[in-house]
Image (cartoon, rainbow, N blue to C red):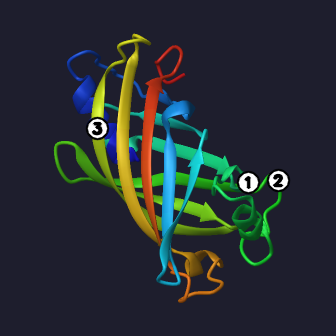
């Protein structure tokens, strides 16, 4: 998500100039992570995380030094069907405790266009940490029309393998590949000075 920060800087350049890193917080009410996988070739099964929190620290003078840290409880997963949720939380898959977390911490950035970038980071899922690369796009960066503060929105995608995170039960019949779509909004933190 670092590259998202770089793209956000382009959008904010006309309204704000920051000499020091600036903190942003995710808008939990408008940030979602959707995931889908193939179920035996018959259907596509969907799930979602929403209401999670995170912090973006943006360094306008050195975007590569920016950072993102996002986390959410595994048990905040939404499946739309209680029996599926219970199965995913069972020993067949997560065997999840109430305080088990999913987290992403950015480690690198490659800006690929005016509003696109590849974001490298460490994803920790089911107690396993692996490097992933998000294909990210800035949707908009401007003053929020109702909140009257700097705001930015981003989309990103990545494909994960369940088996990489010790979650591969029933693969390949139930698809090992999980397509992930991320859409988040971030707002300038109170003070907005990185402190």
Q: Does residue 119 lie above or below 42 as drawn?
A: above
Seen at 27% across and 24% down, the residue is 12
Cα–Cα gap, marks 2 and 1 = 7 Å
Say left or right for 153 vs 31: left
Residue 147: percent from left, percent from top: 44, 13
Seen at 51% across and 14% down, the residue is 191
Cα–Cα gap, marks 2 and 3 = 34 Å
Residue 118: percent from left, percent from top: 31, 56
Circle 2: is it few (<14), some (14-19), or many (20+) Cα within 10 Å?
few
Q: Which residue is mark 3?
A: 139
Is the Cβ of the residue at disc 2 closer than 8 Å to that at disc 1?
Answer: yes
Seen at 45% across and 25% down, the residue is 187
Q: Which residue is mark 2?
A: 98
Say left or right for 170 vs 31: right
Say left or right for 5 vs 167: left
N-term-proximal mark, 1 vs 3? 1
Residue 111: percent from left, percent from top: 24, 50
N-term-proximal mark, 2 vs 1? 1
Seen at 47% across and 18% down, the residue is 192
Say left or right for 132 vs 4: right
Q: Does residue 178 lie above or below 47 as drawn?
A: below
N-term-proximal mark, 2 vs 3? 2
Q: Which mark is residue 75?
A: 1
> Residue 37, can we see it?
yes
Q: Secondary structure at mark 1?
A: helix
| Quarter of the figure with the C terminus | top right
Residue 115: percent from left, percent from top: 22, 43
Q: Secondary structure at mark 2?
A: loop
Circle 1: is it few (<14), some (14-19), or many (20+) Cα within 10 Å?
some
């Amino acid at each position: 998500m670092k590259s998202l920060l770089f793209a956000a800087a382009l959008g904010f350049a006309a309204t704000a100039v920051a000499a020091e890193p600036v903190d942003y917080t995710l808008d939990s009410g408008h940030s979602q992570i959707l995931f889908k996988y193939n179920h035996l070739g018959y259907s596509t099964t969907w799930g979602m995380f929403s209401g999670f929190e995170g912090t973006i620290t943006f360094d306008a003078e050195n975007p590569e030094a920016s950072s993102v840290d996002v986390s959410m409880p595994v048990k905040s997963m939404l499946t739309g069907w209680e029996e599926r949720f219970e199965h995913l939380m069972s020993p067949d898959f997560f065997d999840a405790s109430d305080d088990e977390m999913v987290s992403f911490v950015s480690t690198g950035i490659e800006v690929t266009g005016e509003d696109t970038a590849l974001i490298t980071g460490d994803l920790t899922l089911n107690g396993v940490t692996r490097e992933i690369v998000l294909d990210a796009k800035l949707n908009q960066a401007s003053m929020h029309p109702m909140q009257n503060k700097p705001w930015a929105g981003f989309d990103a995608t990545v494909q994960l393998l369940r088996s990489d995170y010790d979650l591969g039960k029933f693969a390949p019949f139930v698809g090992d590949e999980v397509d992930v779509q991320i859409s988040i909004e971030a707002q300038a933190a109170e003070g907005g000075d990185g402190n």
